[in-house]
Image (cartoon, helix red, strand yellow):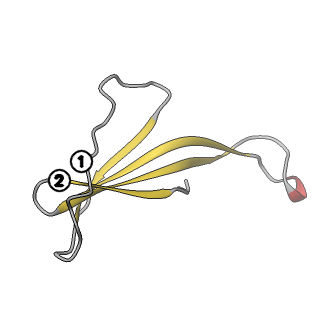
Amino acid sequence: VMFFGCLLVFINADGVADVVLSCALVEEGVGLGGMGGGALFTRTPATLVLRDVPVGPDESLDTLTPFVPPSVPDPDLLLFETKVS
């Protein structure tokens, strides 16, 4: 599993931020493809949320907003969340 994405940062009240990565979940598929007859790969859009990442005192927290997951779950949306320690 590999994640590729762009970085977005959201802030919480106590000097920590939620880092949100817009990614692609890459899975090895079945079949012939690629150079040398290797397996095909499938890519599915995904979101990775790293919660409570510490923010340095020199960072401006005024421009950041907290990450709020969708209120209605989307069965097609892959959302991975973990708390950073």
Report the residue at 88% width, 52% height from top: 37
Residue identified by numbered label 2: 12
Residue plotted at (30% across, 51% down): 82
Q: Secondary structure at mark 2?
A: loop
Image coordinates of residue 8 in percent, x first then y, are: 39, 56
Which of 12/73 is in front? 12
Residue that protrudes farthest toward the front in the picture: 63
Picture layout, residue 7 above or below residue 28:
below
**To which quarter of the image does residue 54 belong?**
bottom left
Residue at disc 1, secondary structure: loop
Marking on residue 66: 1
Which numbered tag is attached to residue 25?
none
Q: Amino acid at mark 1?
A: Pro
What residue type is disc 2 on? Asn
Residues under numbered marks 1 and 2 in contact, where contact means CB atoms less than 8 Å apart: yes
Q: Quick one: label 1, few (<14), some, or many (20+) residues within 10 Å? A: few
The first of marks 1 and 2 along the sequence is 2
Counting from the top left corner in percent of width and height, residue 44 is at 59, 40
Count of numbered tags: 2
Label 2 Cα neighbours within 10 Å, binned few <14 / some 14-19 / many ≥20: some
Distance in Å between CA atoms under marks 1 and 2: 6 Å
Which quadrant is home to the C terminus? bottom left
69 over 32 or under it: above or below: above
Report whether 63 appears left or right of 6. Answer: left
**Residue 74 pos. (x, y %):** 42, 25
Residue at 18 percent of width and 61 percent of height? 16
